[in-house]
Image (cartoon, grey):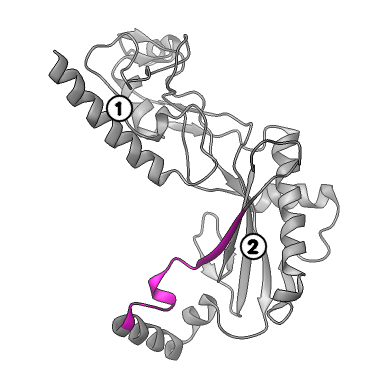
Amino acid sequence: MYGSPQLLQLSGIGPGDLLREFGIPVIREIPGVGANLHDHFNTYLVWRRKQSVTINDLARSPLIKAKAAVQYAVSRSGHLSNAGIYAGAFVKSDPRLETPDLQINMFGWSAVERLRTGIKPHPFSAFTLSPVHLRPEGRGTVRIKSPDPFAPPSIRFNFLASEYDFRALIYGARLARKIAAQPALAPFAGEEVLPGPQCQSDEDMIAEIRVRGVSNLHPVGTCRMGRGVDAVVDPRLRVHGVERLRVADASIMPQVPGGNTNAPSIMIGEKCAAMVLEDAQAA
């Protein structure tokens, strides 16, 4: 997460050199504040749909929009009742792994651009298969750039830091193509639009991943729970060496879980509240 390490650093808790650089008195030197930032990372492949039944058609057709609105109003069903993610699978990029390191998501839509300019659907019916790397090796940082609390921090993810990070996504992209080629999808899948059939070699795929790969918006790790000099909070979420201060969000996760972070973050908040009550009752 971003706000928790920024707030700690601004309060004098964090890497000593960083705090002194901005004239912030060091209350507690903890090098791990703002370190260990990582996130799921994904790329995506797009196929034309042979029938006009995807969310792309909803976006470009006033008639389909009206039908979808009526369907939702009457039965709370249809396109407007979900996020457009209809199926998923957890798989291993290497059979020697103990647990899956990839999640393949199927979207009932596709986009021209999913980066800085936002999401704009393709002007034709299409679907997307998106391989998500669940266990990346790259680690980044969140560091203040100013003692001004309203100044945004520097956020550096260091995505795709290792050969394994690329290898897992390449495997996922090839597996997505195998899925789209299965007989069950033959009546629906048309031509591959992105990255396109010309993208075949590992080198081509690496280039595509660098250009179109995106964060999966599951950042964790910047106030890591544990023991040792780099850990920020203990197992009861108390900041090491600082009384009556806890952190309770995804930043305390030592490693991103092999799935979405929303439910685990809620669990962290609930558990922290229970521990605060336990400590108050024991005092």
| Residue 26 at least partly seen | no
Residue 98, horizontal then vertical, whole percent: 67, 35
Residue 137, horizontal then vertical, whole percent: 64, 31
Residue 82 colored magenta?
yes
- Considering only vertical position in the picture, is 54 above or below 211? below
**Secondary structure found at label 1:** loop
Residue 172, horizontal then vertical, whole percent: 71, 51
Q: CA distance from mark 2 to mark 1?
A: 42 Å
| Residue 92 at least partly seen | yes
**Quadrant assignment, res 68:** bottom left
The foreground one among 232 and 269 is 269
State which region is magenta.
Answer: 75-89
- Considering only vertical position in the picture, is 79 above or below 222? below
- Considering only vertical position in the picture, is 213 above or below 151? below
Do callouts 2 and 1 mark residues in contact (Cβ within 8 Å)?
no
The foreground one among 9 and 101 is 101
> Which residue occupies 56% across, 42% down?
40
Q: Is residue 71 left or right of residue 211?
A: left
Residue flagged by tag 1: what amino acid is it?
A: Asp
Q: Residues within 10 Å of mark 1 (few under 14, many from 20)?
A: few
In front: label 2 or label 1 = 2
> Which residue occupies 48% across, 86% down?
61
Residue 128 colored magenta?
no
Residue flagged by tag 2: what amino acid is it?
A: Leu
Residue 129 badge: 2
Residue at the right extreme of this rendering: 201
**Quadrant assignment, res 27:** top left
Read off the residue under disc 1: 148
The foreground one among 45 and 278 is 278
> Which residue occupies 75% across, 41% down?
94
**Secondary structure found at label 2:** strand
